[in-house]
C-alpha cells in the first residue's frame, strides 16, 4: 500500500487566495483526520471523519476553513480566503476507525503551506 | 481542558546516553496512549502504543514506555540513544469521550538532538 497520499507537498500562495489541500487515505481505513502543525501551537486536530461523515470539527479555526470527504478514498481541506497566519504544515492521517480507539493513525507526508 | 503535556521542549544528549521523555495527560477514565516520532523532513510514525495489559510497552528501535495510571503518565525511555534517534517525539492520548473513532490529543512534542 502506498500509505496516505497528500497533495500538493508544497504550496505558496498570496493572501486572499483559495487553497485546496488533498488527501487519499489508506484503502480500507474508515477514519480520516486533518491536523495542522506550527511551531507555536504544535500539532492540532482540525477535523476528523468516520465513514465519510464529519464527527468533530471543533478544531477548525474559523469559517474560512472547510473540509469534505465525498467518498472513502478522498478528502479535501479548503481555506478561503487564505491569510499569512494559516502558514503551517497540514497533515492528513487515516486509521481503521475501530470502536476501541486503539487503532494506529498513519500520517501522510504533509503539505507545507506558505501564505504571503 | 483536556490536555497532554510533554515536559521538555528540547533535549540534547550524547550518543549512548539514556533517554527519558516525560508525558502526562490531564484526565481520568480509560485512555489509550501513543508515542509518535517525526524524523527530520519526514511524517509522523508510530513508535509504540498502550491500551491494556502490561503497563510496560516495548516499541520499535529499542524504545519502551511505562504507563503509570496513578501519575497519569506515559514516559518514553531508551537505554542508549543513537545519532539516528534525532527527531521530534510526540505523546498522544485518545480523547476523554472514549475516542471511539480514535481521535487523539497530542502533546506539543519534544525535540531530541543526539550528538555523535
Image: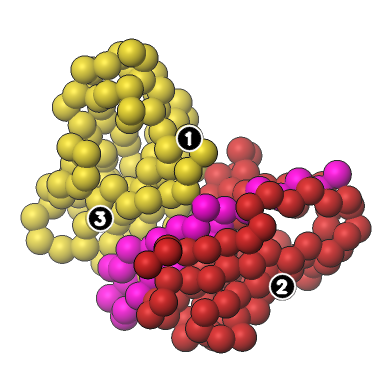
Determine crowd level at label 3: few under 14, some 14-19, many 20+ residues with C-alpha closer than 10 A: many
Q: Colour of chain A?
A: red
Q: Are marks 3 and 1 on the same chain?
A: yes
Residue to which mark 3 is pinned: B49
Q: Is residue A98 part of the magenta span, yes or no?
A: yes
- Of marks 2 and 1, the one in the foreground: 1
The region drawn magenta spans A91-116
What residue do we see at 8% from left, 55% from top?
A: B54
Q: Colour of chain B?
A: yellow
Compute the Cα span from label 3 to label 1: 22 Å
- The answer to whether residue B103 is visible is no
Q: Of the residues under marks 3 and 1, which one precedes in the sequence?
A: 1
Instruction: Please tell me which residue is depicted at 28% across the width and 76% down the height of the picture.
Output: A100
Corner quadrant of residue B112: top left
Q: Nearer the viewer, residue A35 or B94?
A: A35
* Outermost left residue: B54
Residue, disc 2: A66
The residue closer to the viewer here, A67 or A3, is A3
Classify residue A17 by image quadrant.
bottom right
Q: Secondary structure at mark 3?
A: strand
Residue at x-position 58% and y-position 68%? A23
| Left or right, residue A64 beside residue B31 | right
Q: Are marks 2 and 1 on the same chain?
A: no
CA separation in Å, label 2 and label 1:
29 Å
Residue on which the image places disc 1: B40
Spot occupied by residue A10 in the image (x, y as percentages of width and height): 68, 49
Amino acid at each position: 500500500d502506498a500509505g496516505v497520499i497528500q497533495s500538493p507537498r508544497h504550496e505558496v500562495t498570496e493572501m486572499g487566495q483559495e487553497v485546496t489541500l488533498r488527501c487519499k487515505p489508506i484503502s480500507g481505513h474508515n477514519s480520516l483526520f486533518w491536523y495542522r502543525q506550527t511551531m507555536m501551537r504544535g500539532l492540532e486536530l482540525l477535523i476528523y471523519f468516520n465513514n465519510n461523515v464529519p464527527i468533530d470539527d471543533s478544531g477548525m479555526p474559523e469559517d474560512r476553513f472547510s473540509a469534505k470527504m465525498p467518498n472513502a478514498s478522498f478528502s479535501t481541506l479548503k481555506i478561503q480566503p487564505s491569510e499569512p497566519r494559516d502558514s503551517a504544515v497540514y497533515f492528513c492521517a487515516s486509521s481503521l476507525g475501530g470502536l476501541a480507539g486503539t487503532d494506529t493513525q498513519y500520517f501522510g507526508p504533509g503539505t507545507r503551506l506558505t501564505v504571503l | 481542558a483536556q490536555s497532554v503535556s510533554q515536559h521538555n521542549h528540547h533535549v540534547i544528549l550524547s550518543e549512548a546516553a539514556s533517554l527519558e521523555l516525560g508525558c502526562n495527560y490531564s484526565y481520568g477514565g480509560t485512555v489509550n496512549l501513543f508515542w509518535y516520532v517525526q524524523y527530520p523532513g519526514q511524517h509522523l510514525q508510530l513508535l509504540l502504543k498502550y491500551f491494556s495489559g502490561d503497563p510496560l510497552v516495548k516499541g520499535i528501535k529499542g524504545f519502551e514506555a511505562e504507563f503509570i495510571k496513578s501519575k497519569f503518565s506515559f514516559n518514553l525511555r531508551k537505554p542508549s540513544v543513537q545519532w539516528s534517534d534525532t527527531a521530534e517525539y510526540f505523546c498522544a492520548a485518545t480523547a476523554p469521550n472514549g475516542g471511539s473513532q480514535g481521535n487523539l490529543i497530542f502533546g506539543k512534542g519534544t525535540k531530541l538532538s543526539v550528538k555523535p
